[in-house]
Amino acid sequence: MSPPPESNPPSQKHLDETPRWLGYFVVVEGIDGTGKSTLVGGLAESLRGRGIACVTSGEPTDGPHGRKIRELAKSGRYDVSPEDELALFIEDRKEHLQRLIKPGLGEGKVVILDRYFYSSMAYQGARGLDPAVIRARHLEFAPEPDLLVILELDVEQSLERIHASRKGGADEFEGREYLGRVAAVFDDLVHPNLLRLDAGLSPEDLVGRVVEAMGPWLEDRG
Ligand code: TYD
């Protein structure tokens, strides 16, 4: 028997609060190059086609903290300590929750995110912070989604996709070894409603699998 993964302390908080909201909260995670934004867009389009109101968004956001994160990334991420970097992502996420995520869910919409706090566990975890501690910090203020989708792709393929789409070398966010450590945290994640999908599937198949996983909620709303 292997011990439970370190990054997953027991958390029942989200299960004790049913119903938490009228809407449905979906988060798509995965390493760079897995096609998260394509899935987020395709899922929203499919749900809207069924008359379901959706909001799509992602992190880092385009808000003031998110912009600062992007500027720092451009100027060289390793000038910033992992702790300071995590603090920026947390500020960005708090603002995102208040401005977009919670209002959308409260209005009964499907809120679909490209990255959420699992990315902090993975990316800041890969810089040496403890993913379990990062998760615990988030559970103080950030609800877990109804469905967590992880797009899986091996690191070599991820790097190939990144190079093909950007026509340039990997930047500091995307070094091979670092990405391997990020992927390892995603591999260890647990969540009560977790869907791991092969990022090599077609965009249509990926959307179909997520809609299928949302089945019980879609049926409930008639
Ligand atoms: P993003 O702009 O979404 O880039 P991409 O389109 O490549 O996914 O995210 C920029 C980077 O920010 C990405 O490499 C992952 C990283 N990141 C963290 O390090 N921590 C976090 O909490 C989040 C949300 C993202």
Image: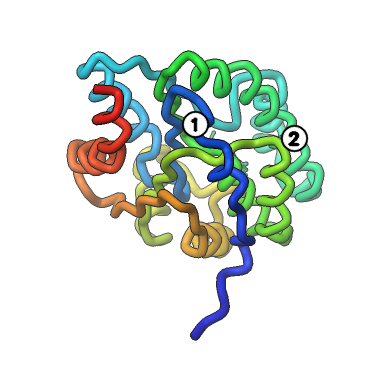
Give the secondary structure at mark 1: loop
**Structural crowding at the residue carrying mark 1, measured as other residues with C-alpha within 10 Å and reported as few (<14), some (14–19) or many (≥20):** few
Indicate the quadrant where residue 24 lies.
Answer: top left
Residue pictured at 30% horizontal, 50% vertical: 199
Q: Position of residue 158 (x, y in %)?
A: 39, 53
Q: Position of residue 162 (x, y in %)?
A: 41, 45
Q: Which residue is mark 2?
A: 88
Give the secondary structure at mark 2: helix
| Residues at circles 1 and 2 in contact by the CB criterion of under 8 Å | no
* Residue 70 horizontal side relative to residue 41, left or right: right
Q: Which residue is mark 1?
A: 19
| Front residue of this view, candidates 35 and 26 | 26
In the picture shown, does residue 107 fall above or below 35?
Answer: above
Q: Which of marks 2 and 1 precedes in the sequence?
A: 1
* Residue 160 horizontal side relative to residue 102, left or right: left
In the picture shown, does residue 186 fall above or below 90?
Answer: below
| Front residue of this view, candidates 149 and 139 | 139
Residue pictured at 52% horizontal, 82% vertical: 2
Q: Quadrant of ligand 1?
A: top right
Indicate the quadrant where residue 67 lies.
Answer: top right
- In the orientation shown, which residue stands out farthest toward the bottom? 1
Amino acid marked by disc 1: Pro
Whether label 1 lies within 8 Å of ligand 1 gets the answer: no
Residue pictured at 55% horizontal, 57% vertical: 182
Q: Position of residue 25 (x, y in %)?
A: 45, 32
Amino acid marked by disc 2: Leu
| Front residue of this view, candidates 187 and 50 | 50
